[in-house]
Every structure is written in C-alpha cells, then in structure tokens.
Image (tube, helix red, strand yellow):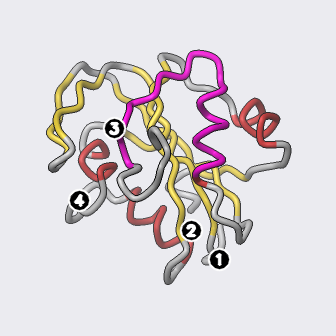
C-alpha cells in the first residue's frame, strides 16, 4: 500500500454480542459477524497513514469507527489509489451485496450517504465487490499495510 490518496474498506470481525457507545451518534448493538466500513484518505500520508491508524488498537477516538474498532478485529483492508473520491460510490456498491445490512447513519455525518458501515453475518468476498464496481481493488492485512 502506498501513501497515495484513495478509498478503502475495513473488513472487521466481531465474535461477541455487545453494545458500544459511539460518541454522540448513540449506542451500536454489535453481533458476531463482519462489519465493513468505507472510508477515504485524501490528506497527508494517504491511504497508508489512515489504514495504519485504524489498525492500531489504542488511539484517541476521532471517528465513529474508532469506537467500533475497540471490539472488532481488522481481518483485511480493500483499497484503491484512484484519485477520485469514491467512498459514496463504494457505499452504494456494498449495499448491493447479498446479505448486506446497513447500519444507518454510521460514519456518514459529513455526506448524504445512508451509511458507511454494513453488517454481514458471513464476510463478503473482494471479487464480488470489485465486480459490482467494475474495476479491480487491492487487498492487504494490517500487518502488510
């Protein structure tokens, strides 16, 4: 993964039922399964810096996802270094995947999307996501970052 700007999806796994207070957003009841969170990184350090931050377990809470990360493990990261802001398009693409359950209002307070977080009992695969997008997307783990 380069320090170029781009868009990413965190593929998170949870194994327990829990409730977590998400800042001023409210309480999120999580359940075992996978949560996919879409974000973009157009600031300093690009995708690499943002994903590295998300992969750290301990950090100051700034975004909605920081609260969920305390209870979820990053299994993989899907990303693209395309220079266009694609997070809204990617959120619509994830919504089209079978079994996608949107977590309404999560991670999208600065845009018009319904959500940037989706729950899946079983993790979707990257190939299916890329097929909906119509172009390839790369993947890595936090260790590879």
Region of the chain picked out in magenta, as a range: 88-107
- Residue to which mark 3 is pinned: 72
Q: Work out how far the residue at label 4 is from the one at label 2, CA to CA, in angstroms.
A: 19 Å
Instruction: Tell whether position 96 is magenta.
Output: yes
Q: Secondary structure at mark 1?
A: loop
5 or 1, which is in the foreground? Answer: 5
Quarter of the picture containing the C terminus is: bottom right
Labelled disc at residue 58 = 4
Q: Work out how far the residue at label 2 is from the one at label 1, CA to CA, in angstroms.
A: 6 Å
Residue density around tag 1, few if under 14, some if 14–19, many if 20 or more, within 10 Å: some
Q: Work out how far the residue at label 2 is from the one at label 3, CA to CA, in angstroms.
A: 20 Å
Residue at the spot 31% in from the left edge and 20% down from the top edge: 31
Q: Are marks 2 and 3 in contact (CB under 8 Å)?
A: no
Instruction: Tell whether position 20 is magenta.
Output: no
58 w.r.t. 49: above or below: above
73 w.r.t. 119: above or below: below
Mark with earlier residue (1, 3): 1
- Residue to which mark 1 is pinned: 4
Extreme residue in the bottom direction: 44
Q: Work out how far the residue at label 1 is from the one at label 3, CA to CA, in angstroms.
A: 26 Å
């Amino acid at each position: 993964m380069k320090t170029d700007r781009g868009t990413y999806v965190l593929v998170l796994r949870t194994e327990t039922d829990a409730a977590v207070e998400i800042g001023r957003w409210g309480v999120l009841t999580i359940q075992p399964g996978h949560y996919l969170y879409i974000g973009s990184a157009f600031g300093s350090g690009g995708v690499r810096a943002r994903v590295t931050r998300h992969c750290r377990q301990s950090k100051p809470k700034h975004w909605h996802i920081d609260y969920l990360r305390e209870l979820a493990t990053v299994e993989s990261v899907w990303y693209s270094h395309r220079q266009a802001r694609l997070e809204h398009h990617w959120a619509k693409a994830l919504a089209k995947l079978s079994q996608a359950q949107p977590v309404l209002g999560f991670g999208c307070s600065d845009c018009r999307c319904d959500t940037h977080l989706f729950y899946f009992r079983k993790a979707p695969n990257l190939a299916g996501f890329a097929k909906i997008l119509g172009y390839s997307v790369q993947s890595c783990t936090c260790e590879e970052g």
